[in-house]
Amino acid sequence: MTSLPPTLATAVVQWQASHGRNHLPWQQMRDPYRVWLSEIMLQQTQVTTVLGYYDRFLQRFPDVASLAAAAQDDVLALWSGLGYYSRARNLHKCAQAVVNDFGGAFPRSSALLATLPGIGRSTAAAIASFCFGERAAILDANVKRVLTRALAYGEDLSQAKNEKALWLKAEALLPTQQLEVQMPRYTQGLMDLGATVCLPRKPNCLICPLQPQCKAAAAGNPQDYPVKTRKTKRSSEAWWLLIAVDAQQCVWLERRPQQGIWAGLYSPAIFDGRTALEQAVALQWPSAAAANELPAFLHVLTHKDLFLHPVFVPVGTAAAAGSGEGGRWAGVAEWAAMGLPAPVRRLLDEELGA
């Protein structure tokens, strides 16, 4: 008599224990602060990039209380280069909420975790699963790919009703026994499969523990899943960056608004054209030296392409400048510790850094 294949959950748990990723610094622990920090950093960012930031963040903010007490500028400065800066702002707000509303201890249920700033349903489930063994389903992009292929779930996930139905299927597949042990393994296992085996374009079906029961593998069409017909529309903008430099090699930086691109970060004054930039210079520094426009370069955001035109203008003695909120002159030692967009930091370091 042929034995039945293991359930999907059992197959994932067994595979993760022997073949999954078990060496990362936020694994094999139940500290919700560290797990939460890793989950937020890993959104839209590769593990290799996160590792260094994660260590530096913990050195500066070893617990939720120290993060909650920090100035937002300090948090953004440490985050600089990771991108998606709303994550850093929400990280700070979330730490403050944990301290102010929950006495400094993360809530133990995914339902309560999901009420905190920057924690969505899937992230809340991951924290609750890893730290508290809660039977809660995750459904990030990688896991959607694994489950839609295993189930041959071909409904269009751009429609809310179909995504809701997939959530129900994901919940039905969860382990039912020894949750303290199996839920962390299962949750990590799905993440690992999506990141290392069940890849978007060339899935490694032959080494996948779900291959015997994967309906898409059996049909030979795993690339057809998941189905999502609504495409994100990309747009583009051209920005001229006025990099005013005084006699001491300090740069005028303005805080960006709290909404929009580079929200809350410091950057040079931004204009939508060279003429507007020149008019601002003539008004603010009529005796400034000739401007030096460097070659434009592309900075790619999630849904937008930014064509950046840096214009360096020596202005002599520093004076009050610009109209941006919280503007200031900053030398290399100062801007190194400020929250700057990654392309601005690289530009200043390359052109003016020591």
Image (cartoon, rainbow, N blue to C red):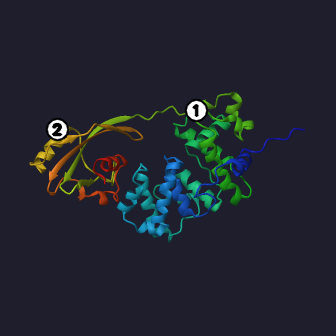
Point out which mark residue 329 bears. none
In the visual, does 172 lie left or right of 329? right
Q: Is residue 338 above or below residue 312?
A: below
Q: Residue furthest right?
A: 1
Which residue is depicted at the point 65% across and 59% down? 133
Q: Is residue 104 above or below residue 264?
A: below
Q: Residue furthest bottom?
A: 103
Q: Which one is in front, 349 or 163?
A: 349
Which residue is tagged 1?
201
Q: Is residue 314 above or below residue 71?
A: above
Q: x and y percent of residue 64 in the render?
A: 48, 66
Q: Please state, as top left, top right, bottom left or bottom right, where the N terminus lies in the image.
A: top right
Q: Secondary structure at mark 1?
A: loop
Q: Please state, as top left, top right, bottom left or bottom right, where the C terminus lies in the image.
A: bottom left
Q: Which one is in front, 165 or 8?
A: 8
Which residue is tagged 2?
275
- Amino acid type, callout 1: Arg
- Amino acid type, callout 2: Thr
Circles 2 and 1: CB distance less than 8 Å?
no
Decide if residue 40 is in sight here.
no
Q: Which one is in front, 108 or 141?
A: 141
Which residue is depicted at the point 50% across and 57% down? 54
Which residue is depicted at the point 33% across and 58% down? 338
